[in-house]
Image (cartoon, rainbow, N blue to C red):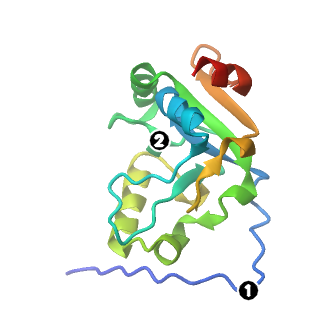
Amino acid sequence: MHIHIQLVPIPPPPNHLPNSHDPPALFHYTTGLNLRSIITSGQIKPSTAHVPPDEKPVVWFSTSRHWEPTATKCSVPGTAGQLITAQAQGGLVRITVPASTAPHRFEDLPLIAGTAPSVCIGLLIAGLELGSDPDTWRFTLHPVPIALFREVEFFDFDKDGWVAVDMAELTCRN
């Protein structure tokens, strides 16, 4: 028996309002090394890694205040993977932006970015296997300038929480 799944994107109706359950902010999860590139360029650029020429690259965000498992840079799940990533990549970083920055949901990916349904299913499965909740995923096609950053935080494993850093100080260091 073969099961075939086909994603059919449904565009939002005109004058569609965002889901009232969404928080007022979104979070971009990355690493200290990537933060350095973000500060140098002045923006979070859409990811072009493994994106075919006929697809539009996106910048990913989450509505979750907890580390996004798909941002871990190794195949080890959970806290162990986060520790390995933090050690190899200069720490775990969370950038807070207004929710309006990335209005699109994961299910909009085929329609908005032109992502093949088979790729969407692969992303969905990979995210679920890593412990992610795709309902929290949001994206934009546009670069996100640092002027939109509300807060930049590093994860402190000793305190088991996020610690805000001064963007002006970071900018001077980089």
Residue drawn where x is 44% and y is 23% of the image:
83
Q: Are marks 2 and 1 in contact (CB under 8 Å)?
A: no
Give residue 94's position: percent from left, percent from top: 62, 35
Question: In the picture, which quadrant includes the C terminus?
Answer: top right
* Residue 30 drawn above or below residue 19: above
Left or right of 55 in this view: 59: right
Q: According to the image, label 1 marks what residue?
A: 14
Residue displayed at 43% across by 37% down:
72
- Residue lying at the far top of the rendered structure: 158
Q: Can you give x and y, in whole percent of width and height, for residue 138 in the image?
A: 60, 58
Percent coordinates x, y for residue 137 in the rendering:
57, 56
Q: 81 or 144, which lies in front? A: 144
- Tell me where residue 77 sits by quadrant: top left
Q: Which residue is mark 2?
A: 71
Q: Dividing the picture into quarters, in which one does residue 152 lie?
A: top right
Going by the image, does 135 lie left or right of 113?
A: right
Name the element at disc 1: loop
Mark toward the viewer: 2 or 1: 1
Tell me the amino acid under the disc marked 2.
Ala
Label located before the other in sequence (2 or 1): 1
Which part of the image, by quadrant, shows the N terminus? bottom left
In the foreground, 168 or 70 = 168
How crowded is the residue under tag 1: few (<14 C-alpha within 10 Å), some, or many (20+)? few
Give the amino acid type for the residue marked by disc 1 in the picture. Pro
